[in-house]
Amino acid sequence: MTRKLTGRHVFLILLAFFGTITAVNVFMASMAISTFPGLEGKNTYNASRSFDSDRRAQVALGWQVEDAYRDGYLILTIKDAEGQPAKVKDISVLVGRATIAEFDQRPVFIREGADFIAPVALDYGKWILRIEALAEDGTAFRQSRNLSVPRG
């Protein structure tokens, strides 16, 4: 014996269908808003006015950066255009995930030659390094790098 499909059944099916879609959309939107780290810069107009001159000054430094993560230590190697240790006056690095600010860290680095070493606990996966350094002559150096930490 089959039941007859009534208007009430169709209404309940449609209500369940669109209710599920609405619930998923509300959940996804709330997760997106709660994990968004915010703006990259406070005043993008002022930053854009000096972008080209800042970029030229950074390129003129000729710095090359290499990164590694071994045994709980983040290692940044910064060399100048001649392959010598770069003359870095100050360095700050923000280590975080690409899409969530919850795991952001600012490790404290110790210099050893061309290497800057900091203990930092990173789980496996993709991390982003936002490096801000200052040359001895006052030139700002900024670079974002992707770091992959293997499982295990």
Image (cartoon, rainbow, N blue to C red):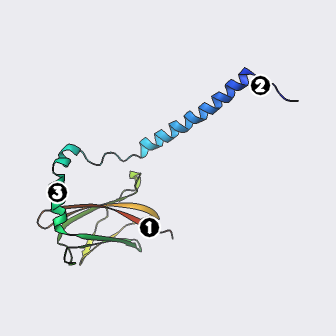
| Contact (Cβ within 8 Å) of mark 2 with mark 3 | no
The residue under label 2 is: 5
Indicate left or right for 17 with 63 as reference.
right
Q: Nearer the viewer, mark 2 or mark 1?
A: 2
Dot 1 amino acid type: Val
N-terminal of the pair, mark 2 or mark 3, is 2
What is the residue that sits farthest to the left in this orientation? Answer: 137
Cα separation, mark 1 vs mark 3, equals 31 Å
Say which residue appears at 42% left-offset and 41% top-offset: 33
Indicate left or right for 97 with 81 as reference.
right
Cα separation, mark 2 vs mark 3, equals 70 Å
Callout 1 secondary element? strand
Dot 3 amino acid type: Asp
The residue under label 3 is: 54
Q: Quadrant of residue 148?
A: bottom left
Residue 149's disc number: 1
- Whether residue 43 is visible here, answered yes or no, is no
